[in-house]
Image (cartoon, rainbow, N blue to C red):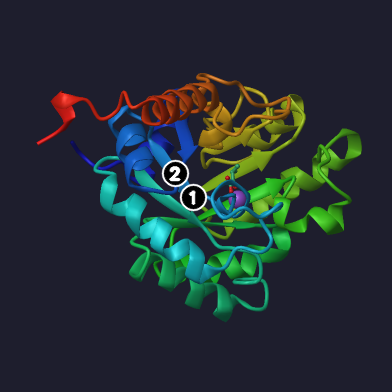
Amino acid sequence: VARIRIHHLHQAKAKGEHFAMLTAYDQYTAEIFDQAGIEVLLVGDSASNNVFGNETSLPVTVDELLPLCRAVARSARRALVVADLPFGSYEVSAQQAVATGVRFLKEGLAHAVKIEGGKFYADTVRAMVQAGIPVMAHIGFTPQSEHALGGYRVQGRGDDAARLIEDAVALADAGAFCVLMEMVPAATAAAVDAAVDVPTVGIGAGNATTGQVLVWQDMAGLRGGKMAKFVKQYADLRTSLTNAAKAYGDDVRSGHFPGPEHSF
Ligand code: KIV
Ligand code: NA
């Protein structure tokens, strides 16, 4: 199977087609989603609060994400693998962003990286693209800025839509190959998509974007608890896994496992 490349995502937008993106943080999920035909795998900094046990994405580090990224990249034959640059690893300067981006392509084996932020990061994107690092731009609600934004809030409502369009245009002009929008009104996201030639991806951004992304543990119901409005749950892995663990524990305690068929 041929690798999905950035130009395939551009072709999807040109043809009015959609592509799917899911987070992945390890070998089996990468392999399964890849074989299921998911076009883009994101090694998100959401690993912070979905793998490492933190409450937010802020604490996760480059050194924590790199091995997950490597595992995903080694396990996906077809999908384009995008890695998040975590909080604090690119904001200081374009040089810092290039250096971190290089690490994700060289040590993490990622094919592209994603950074959060608006037009302020246009020069950073330009420097990274110049260095050979494809960049996906993440605008709208940007979880790494949770404290600055005052919590999880929809961005780009009303007059604020113009700001998001400006951000997207500046980042696309700087060379970003894709613009991802999180928690943006559907009409604003549609206007952003229309304003840029590059493909867009949405999460809580309506259905006018080229692609859609979800955190896989939300999509597959592993996380449990209250789900954001933008999540659609396609499986109930938490219940399946709970039942499997309970049945196994019961079997062990009652002496039913292992049976003769599991014994040498
Ligand atoms: O880290 C992440 O999972 C993300 C997506 C939800 C867009 O950035
Ligand atoms: Na992220």
Question: Can I make out residue 41 in this image?
Answer: yes
Q: Along the horizontal axis of the image, is 72 left or right of 194?
A: left
- Residue 88, percent across and down? 66, 71
Secondary structure under the numbered disc 1 in the rendered image: loop
Q: Along the horizontal axis of the image, is 141 left or right of 39?
A: right
Q: Earlier in the sequence, mark 1 or mark 2?
A: 2
Q: Quadrant of residue 8?
A: top left
- Residue 25, percent across and down? 44, 48
Mark 2 — residue? 24
- Residue 39, percent across and down? 38, 35
Q: Quadrant of residue 179?
A: top right
Residue toward you, 130 or 149: 149
Question: Can I make out residue 14 in this image?
Answer: no
Q: Along the horizontal axis of the image, is 252 left or right of 235?
A: left
The residue lying at 57 percent from left, 55 percent from top is: 52
Q: Is residue 111 above or below residue 1?
A: below
Secondary structure under the numbered disc 2 in the rendered image: loop
Closer to the observer: label 1 or label 2?
Answer: 2
Mark 1 — residue? 177
Mark 2 is on which residue type? Ala
